[in-house]
């Protein structure tokens, strides 16, 4: 298709900025067809039928998982590619030191070379989307252009997309984030497509000043569904810095006590550390209720009342499948069992259902994510460790009614957490906002399969945002500090740190986790209310064993003590690691964080 053809293709908007973006991309990438996404059910049917016919999707048994599909990716395209992800700010300093950087013009020249003709033989989908509510005071619009029907179908689950969004953009002549995506595999005339087109060459690029996203070569979630990590975290974090709000890698939940007292909690854990499970937790303690608002991203602003209000900008869950089951996350199971979902890199069973490691009732035979015959005796896993379900949030039975309120909910507590075998107790409370910022800035976790690379290595993952901070991380810490300084501390959320993953000497988990984490949430609420006891330790306020509700919990007093222990020697060993981490930031690290480290050192008796 030529540029003129693209321009004269009937298009459902008069928004000149959108038309220019579409025309320019079509001229560069030369698709065979342009499809403007409406978001209608007929379109979903057409898209999914196409995906079934090209072999990307296998329709699941409608009696078990209605309107749901199985997909297996190319084995080279299974996770976010952090080493291929760039923040191309004008000034290198604005990306550093935690991001890859290249000069924006140099990157554009390089990528224009890749995009040149890259959609030949394919359909170019134009997806109008909004992150957050269409009725928000300032709706956060985007246009994703992609040559992937898989991405188009998945975006419909994960974001509000289609005609209503485009009409509103047109009415408002709205600003939007242009987000360009290609799988990077053009088709020559007569060439057959493959089930999962992608490229060996991958780039996931954010241009923070322009608020633009260019992605090439991958069809995987976080690399390709550009509303999610690229926009709602990387680009939004830059907007948030400039406008005085926070875009964070956090779940949002509503907790109601037996007395009917409601608290809202946001929690930041790195990928594949249980955000989705906590967001949908089914409490084991009587009378407590959890409702979900979000499982991955929170946009938070100070409201007129001085409190921190959070919304979930997303519309679906893109959850890690392995380990999800009726015990670990019954609410997620109920959500996906309603259908209308896409499962990627799990196993396909003979009756047309899906299975993954950790799910109940292993099938006698299945097809693995690699397309090979699999049985419970097979040495290989049936599903990739980062296999995913993609399912509509509206299907979640415990979705809080406030999800639909564009103002969001006022946050009472923020939890930071990671996956640590040692050192970090089950829960402790920061002394104040600045100390909480220090805890967030030094958050550490063992790496998981959610990103390409080694698994199980301890790395610092500040606020669980290491792969998602769209600007200089020193400035990001400073932004957090200033939120504390510029607002009334009494109205801000209290900050806590949790670790569900501490191990005993035999390597077993000390804390049962999952639904039992409601006991920790209860302690958090009682701390906020000034009711629960705590001991002041060098690292913060740790529960006394009696202050934690352990009624009916199958755990020895020794194990509980070990879960809550603050071992001074273990913490002394953290100090040089934190020191080394802070030194990376040079003069960009806020001085108060050094003061916090000095304080910790002194309290440990160093
Ligand atoms: C992803 O990687 O696509 C994703 C949704 O995020 P995470 O790795 O945080 O689970
Ligand atoms: Mn995430
Ligand atoms: Na991931």
Image: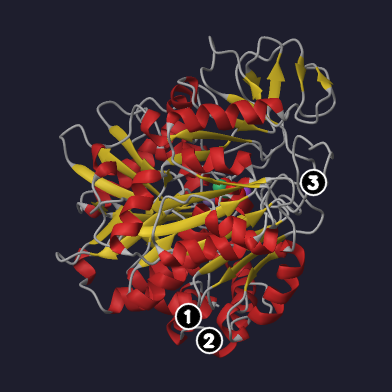
Q: Which mark is residue 475?
A: 1
Say how the picture is coloured: secondary structure
Residue contact at pointers 1 and 2, CB within 8 angstroms: yes
Closer-to-camera residue (532/75): 75
For this view, does 524 lie left or right of residue 200? left
The quarter of the picture where the C terminus appears is bottom right
Image position, residue 597 (x, y; %):
50, 77
Q: Is residue 27 visible?
A: yes
Image position, residue 485 (x, y; %):
29, 79
Q: Residue at x 58, y 79 (%)?
A: 89
Residue on which disc 3 sits: 187
Q: Residue at x 59, y 85 (%)?
A: 93
Vertical side of 586 occupied by 362: above or below: above
- For the residue labelled by badge 1, is the local secondary structure a helix, a strand or a loop? helix
Question: Disc 2 or 3, which lies upstream in sequence?
Answer: 3
For this view, does 404 lie left or right of residue 47? left
Q: Residues within 10 Å of mark 2 (few under 14, many from 20)?
A: some
For the residues marked 1 and 3, what is the alpha-carbon distance in whole angstroms?
44 Å
Q: Nearer the viewer, mark 2 or mark 3?
A: 3
Image position, residue 33 (x, y; %):
63, 46
Q: Residue at x 45, y 20 (%)?
A: 338
Q: Nearer the viewer, mark 1 or mark 3?
A: 3
Question: Disc 1 or 2, which lies upstream in sequence?
Answer: 1
The quarter of the picture where the N terminus appears is bottom right
Q: Residues within 10 Å of mark 3 (few under 14, many from 20)?
A: some
- For the residue labelled by badge 2, is the local secondary structure a helix, a strand or a loop? helix
Toward the bottom, the furthest residue is 587
For the residues marked 2 and 3, what is the alpha-carbon distance in whole angstroms?
47 Å
Residue contact at pointers 1 and 3, CB within 8 angstroms: no
Question: Disc 1 or 3, which lies upstream in sequence?
Answer: 3
Residue on which disc 2 sits: 588
């Amino acid at each position: 298709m030529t540029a003129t053809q693209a321009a004269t293709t009937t298009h459902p908007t008069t928004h000149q900025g959108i038309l220019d973006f579409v025309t320019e991309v079509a001229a560069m990438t030369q698709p065979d067809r342009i499809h403007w996404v409406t978001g209608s059910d007929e379109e979903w049917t057409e898209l999914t039928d196409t995906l079934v016919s090209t072999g990307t999707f296998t329709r699941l048994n409608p009696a078990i998982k209605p309107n749901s599909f199985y997909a297996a990716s190319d084995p080279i395209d299974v996770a976010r590619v952090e080493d291929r992800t760039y923040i191309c700010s004008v000034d290198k300093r604005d990306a550093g030191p935690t991001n890859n950087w290249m000069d924006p013009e140099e990157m554009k020249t390089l990528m224009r070379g890749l995009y040149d003709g890259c959609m030949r033989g394919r359909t170019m989908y134009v997806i109008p989307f909004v992150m957050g509510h269409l009725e928000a005071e300032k709706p956060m619009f985007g246009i994703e252009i992609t040559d992937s029907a898989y991405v188009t179908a998945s975006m419909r689950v994960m974001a509000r997309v289609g005609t209503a969004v485009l009409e509103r953009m047109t009415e408002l002549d709205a600003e939007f984030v242009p987000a360009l995506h290609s799988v990077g595999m053009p088709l020559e005339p007569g060439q057959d497509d493959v089930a999962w087109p992608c490229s060996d060459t991958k780039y996931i690029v954010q241009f923070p000043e322009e608020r633009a996203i260019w992605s090439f070569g991958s069809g995987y979630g976080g690399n390709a569904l550009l509303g999610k990590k690229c926009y709602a975290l990387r680009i939004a974090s830059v907007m948030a810095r400039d406008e005085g709000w926070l875009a964070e890698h956090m779940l949002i939940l509503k907790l109601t006590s037996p007395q009917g007292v409601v608290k809202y909690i946001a929690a930041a854990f790195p990928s594949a550390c249980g955000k989705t499970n906590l967001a949908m937790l089914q409490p084991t303690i009587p009378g407590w209720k959890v409702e979900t608002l979000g499982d991955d991203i929170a946009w938070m602003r100070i409201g007129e009342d001085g409190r921190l209000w959070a919304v979930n900008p997303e519309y679906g869950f893109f959850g890690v499948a392995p380990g999800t089951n009726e015990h670990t996350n019954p609410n997620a199971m109920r959500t996906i069992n309603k259908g209308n979902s896409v499962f990627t890199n799990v196993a396909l069973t003979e009756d047309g259902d899906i299975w993954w490691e950790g799910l109940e009732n292993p099938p006698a035979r299945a097809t693995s994510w690699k397309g090979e015959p699999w049985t419970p005796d097979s040495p290989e896993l049936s599903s990739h460790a980062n296999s995913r379900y993609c399912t509509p949030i509206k299907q979640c039975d415990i979705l809080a009614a406030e999800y639909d309120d564009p103002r969001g909910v006022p946050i009472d507590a923020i939890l930071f957490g990671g996956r640590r075998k040692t050192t970090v107790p089950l829960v402790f409370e920061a002394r104040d906002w600045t100390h909480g910022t220090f805890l967030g800035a030094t958050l550490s976790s063992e790496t998981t399969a959610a990103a390409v690379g080694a698994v199980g290595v301890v790395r610092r993952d500040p606020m669980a945002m290491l792969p998602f901070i769209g600007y200089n991380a020193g400035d990001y810490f400073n932004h957090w500090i200033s939120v504390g300084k510029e607002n009334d501390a009494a109205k801000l959320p209290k900050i806590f740190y949790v670790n569900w993953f501490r191990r005993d000497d035999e390597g077993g988990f000390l804390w049962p986790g999952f639904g039992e984490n409601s006991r920790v949430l209860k302690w958090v609420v009682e701390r906020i209310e000034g009711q629960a006891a705590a001991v002041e330790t060098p690292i913060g306020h740790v529960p006394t064993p009696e202050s934690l509700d352990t009624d009916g919990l199958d755990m020895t007093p020794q194990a509980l003590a070990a879960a809550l222990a603050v071992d001074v020697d273990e913490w002394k060993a953290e100090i040089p690691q934190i020191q080394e981490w802070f030194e990376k930031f040079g003069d960009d690290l806020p001085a108060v964080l050094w003061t916090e480290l000095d304080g910790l050192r002194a309290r440990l008796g160093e």
